[in-house]
Structure formats: structure tokens, C-alpha cells
Image (cartoon, rainbow, N blue to C red):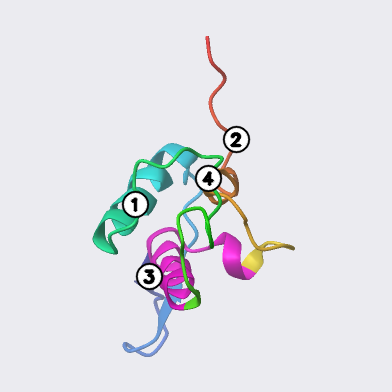
Amino acid sequence: MCVVVPGSPPHKKVNVIPLTTSRAAVEPVVRDFLRRIKKDADASTSTELYADGIGLDSLETAELSALLEDEFGTDPFSTAAELPQTLGEVLDFYGPAAASA
């Protein structure tokens, strides 16, 4: 999300990181992206993102990174110490999975 900061030039926008971003909000965005690029949107959270898993290539990974940055103000590909390897690791970046009852 971007906002114009009062007192700044009108063309200057600043990214704002929502404090309420949750895994539940991120998951449908990621799955919609996977559908759009014709990848397995129903993959389990333990599925590898690359090669034999979902099969994201470097361009698709960059697109997902940009999408998450635009939607949520941050993404695990550019801010995490290590690149996420599974769908679950992408989601975990935004918060842990809810405990099963």
C-alpha cells in the first residue's frame, strides 16, 4: 500500500507496512498469483516453490516478490535472511499458521 505523505511532493509515495498483515490475508493473494501463471494453486504449504515443486522460475519469483511488496509493504524474498523454499515459508513470513483445535 502506498500513501502520499503530507508536505512531500505530490508524486512521491511512501510504502506503508500494514500492522495487521496476516498469513490469512496473504494466502489468497499468493494462490491467485499461482492460478494466473498457471501453476498449482492448490499445492500444500510444504510444496517446494522451485524445480520439482510448484516450478517457479526466476521471473515468476520476482513477480511474486513485487506483488507481495505492493500488496503488503514487504516480502520474504527481499527482506528475509534466506530465500523461502516452500509455499509455507512464504506464508510463515507474515505470521505462523493458526493452531488446529
Q: CA distance from mark 4 to mark 2?
A: 17 Å
Image location of residue 10, percent across then percent down = 32, 87
Instruction: Give the class, few, some or many, for how many residues have Cα within 10 Å of label 3's Cα (few <14, many ≥20).
Output: some
Q: Reading the chain from its start, which is encountered first: label 1 or label 3?
A: 3
Q: Quadrant of the N terminus?
A: bottom left
> In the drawing, what numbered circle is on residue 54?
none
Three-letter code for the amino acid on which mark 2 is drawn: Pro
> Which residue corresponds to the image point at 61% horizontal and 70% vertical from the top-left?
78
Q: Quadrant of residue 43?
A: top left
- Residue found 65% across the figure and 63% down from its top: 83
Residue located 64% across and 66% down the image: 79
Q: Nearer the viewer, residue 62 or 43?
A: 43
- The picture places residue 100, in percent across and down from the top left corner, at 53, 15
Q: Nearer the N terminus, badge 3 or badge 2? A: 3
| Residue corresponding to mark 4 | 47
Say if the magenta span includes residue 5: no
For mark 2, give the secondary structure: loop
For residue 94, above or below residue 70: above
Q: Which residues are magenta?
A: 59-78
Is there CB contact under 8 Å for labels 4 and 3?
no
Q: Mark 4 against mark 3, which lies toward the viewer? A: 4
**Comparing marks 4 and 1, which lies closer to the viewer?**
4
Does dot 3 land on a helix, a strand or a loop? Answer: strand
Residue ID for mark 1 = 29
